[in-house]
Amino acid sequence: MTAAPLIELERASVRLGARTALADLSLAVHAGERIALVGPNGSGKTTLLRLLHGQLPHQLTAGVRRVARGADGREPRQAMLFQRPFLLRLSVRRNVELALWLAGVRGGERRERARAALQRVGLLAEAERPARVLSGGQQQRVALARAWAVRPQLLFLDEPTASLDPHAKREIEALLAEFAAEGMTLVLSSHNLGQVKRLAARVVCLDSGVLVADRPTAGFFNDPLPHAAAQFLKGELP
Amino acid sequence: MNAFTESLFTAAALIVGADAALWQVVVLSLQVSGLASVFGVALGMAAGALLAVTRFPGQRGLVLALNTLLALPPVVVGLTVYLLLSRSGPLGEWGLLFTPTAMVIAQTILVLPLAAALTRQLVVDAMHGNGEQLRSMGAGALLCAALLLVHERAALLTIALTAFGRAISEVGAVMIVGGNIAGVTRVMTTTIALETSKGDLPLALALGLVLLSVVALINLAIATVRALQARQDEGRPR
Amino acid sequence: MISNPTRRRLGHWLAVAVLALGLGTTAQAQPRTLVMASTTSTEQSGLFAHLLPAFRQATGIEVRVVALGTGQALDVARRGDADLVFVHDQAAEERFVAEGFGLQRRAVMFNDFVLVGPRTDPAGTRGSDIAAALRRVAQTGAPFVSRGDRSGTHAAELRHWQAAGIDLAARRPAGYRECGCGMGPALNIASSANAYVLTDRGTWLNFRNRGELAILVEGDRRLFNPYGVIVVNPARHPHVRHELAQTFADWVVSPAGQAVIAAYRINGEPVFFPNAGS
């Protein structure tokens, strides 16, 4: 990768309250990458995602976070999905249009792009229904549509399929794979190693806030690992 | 038991008879408390939502003060407003004492902390889940507050009804700043107090029943509107 | 989010609300209204519902009565929140004028107090001597309800205890209870406790919750309760509606006003006795 990273962390440390959530962590995210964050609960995956996404401006106690600027001087557009899709008590369509409105898109174009996004994820028929009455998988697809609609360069996902049934999981994964193929950079955390193998090209393993492994996927699963990472993998495999 | 049964019959007779003086008192009660609720709830909800999403020095003290004001005795509010509006007081030139306007002012002050404290808690709780997602989509603090108010509009209705209940049921404030002037500033609760002090207890109770009936009618109207709205939301596309 | 029809309806109601409030304030700005501070017992006697419409018919002036205890009524007038006072505590009224808050006290009418108590009269007070009656109440320790609220009635009650030679500050009679309340609530308490209580005849005639109570002492000259009307001094409070207030004061002591007072009846009985000019 010769191009400058979209987002780069250099020896970053984050304190949340009394706890050190991330310690001395360095990570570079380049355009088009598909990165999976793995590690036991409490290892700092969510904090790392938040930090990369720029949601922790005041908690960085050491190190730097750098964001590349495009030709127009702007930062790359980003979006984030969470394990539980947080949809407002509005119609499906309005939830997507809200994201577009917040991104500064004007009236007529908002409607068009919302339609296109819902079409993309296969939920156009549900556009007028209250978002909260949809099933978990459908709601997560709405969240994906909402993210896709603003045309983000980077998409962060915090265990996006952990609460979903297998069918819904597959639908989400299929969409993510398509988005990645279209050039979207993905950074997702997951406990599901099969998902990691299917979606990610690079695996970053955390343990107690420290980065213990950063390998291409094949290398992570097949080659020998540092101790902490190896322990984690052993615990996760059947 | 006699006073209770007598008051039931008296209440029925009053409602059916549609006594002009009683009707005027009911209308004034609704005007004063209704208007005070509109102002108090609008201002209180805005203040409460702002308190929930902003951070500034002394905020915890302000929240403590707000929660303490929930126990503000109506008669104390009445006294304070009286001293402010009295001709010998700072706002005497406005000439508002012993008018319905003074009563609206007093009840607005009474209702405002209630709306603010409840709305603040509501928005704080709503921020827990949704706050991060909204911020990720680019919403600033104020916008977060506004969007969450829309999201929680059903609970806001209950807060508004609670505020209205407090206003229309209080007697201490309106008695002092209004003066209970027959035909001008006499409302339901001051009439009940008057009849009680005259010793006509069945009539006083009956008036209390009339007051509750009026509020019940209002609640019924609101519930019906909400049910119709819910049915509209469920099925048919707009 | 909010549909257009709902938005329009909300706007409509808001306009109605503001208009309604506006109506309220413009009514208050009408030139020919007066604020009169008076007492709860006078209002509860129903006199004003009879007197004020007659005054309005004669002069076109609407009088708005704020009914409080005598002490509070005079305080309201001292603060300039009323244009005139109409109370029944001559000593307090004269003090009010002496302090410069009022122009002149004019006698208007009197009513009388009665001692009310349990029909069986355990303290043996029946008769027409109030001082003797109160002495019997103190001796027997019978329950007695006092208003204790700086009202004209309360002041009168204290004077009668003094006339009976009983020093309340030194030693309270065993059954003496202060409620700090108006005449109606005091009667309610007396009714439920079968206690003695001093009340004005007007409130008693209108009182419904009598229980076992009946009039036991009446007719003592000392029980007569004179009313005075005082216009608030415009030198003290320039904003008061001095001419209108003077019109009322002049009317109520005139033969026309006095006749209206004399004509007021409760259950066919006269309650107030006009005595202007005496």
Image (tube, coloured by chain):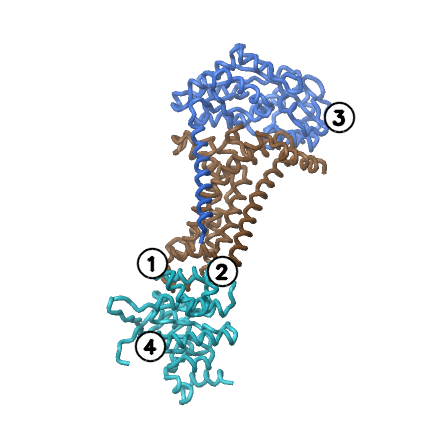
Chain colours: A cyan, B brown, C blue
- Residues at marks 1 and 4, CA–CA distance in whole angstroms: 28 Å
Crowding near pointer 2: few (<14 within 10 Å), some, many (20+)? many
- Residues at marks 1 and 2, CA–CA distance in whole angstroms: 23 Å
Same chain for mark 1 and mark 4? The answer is yes
Crowding near pointer 1: few (<14 within 10 Å), some, many (20+)? few
Crowding near pointer 3: few (<14 within 10 Å), some, many (20+)? few
Q: Name the residue under label 4.
A: A32
Chain of the residue under the numbered disc 1 shown in the image? A
Q: What residue type is labelled 2?
A: Pro
- Mark in the foreground, 3 or 2: 2
Q: How many labels does the image show?
A: 4
Is residue A194 something that shows in the picture? yes
Asked if A76 appears above or below C143 in the picture, the reply is below
- Mark in the foreground, 4 or 3: 4
Chain of the residue under the numbered disc 4 shown in the image? A
Q: Earlier in the sequence, mark 1 or mark 4?
A: 4
Asked if B152 appears above or below C213 in the picture, the reply is below
Q: Name the residue under label 1.
A: A106
Q: What residue type is labelled 4?
A: Gly
Helix or strand or loop: what does disc 1 sit on? loop
- Mark in the foreground, 4 or 2: 2
Q: In which quarter of the image is residue C39?
A: top right
Q: Which of marks 4 and 2 is nearer the N terminus?
A: 4
**Contact check, label 4 and label 3, Cβ < 8 Å:** no
Same chain for mark 4 and mark 2? The answer is yes
Residue at x-position 60% and y-position 41%? B212
Nearest the viewer among C78 and B122 is B122
Pinpoint residue B148: horizontal percent, then vertical percent: 44, 57
Q: What residue type is labelled 3?
A: Thr
Q: Mark 2 points at which residue?
A: A130
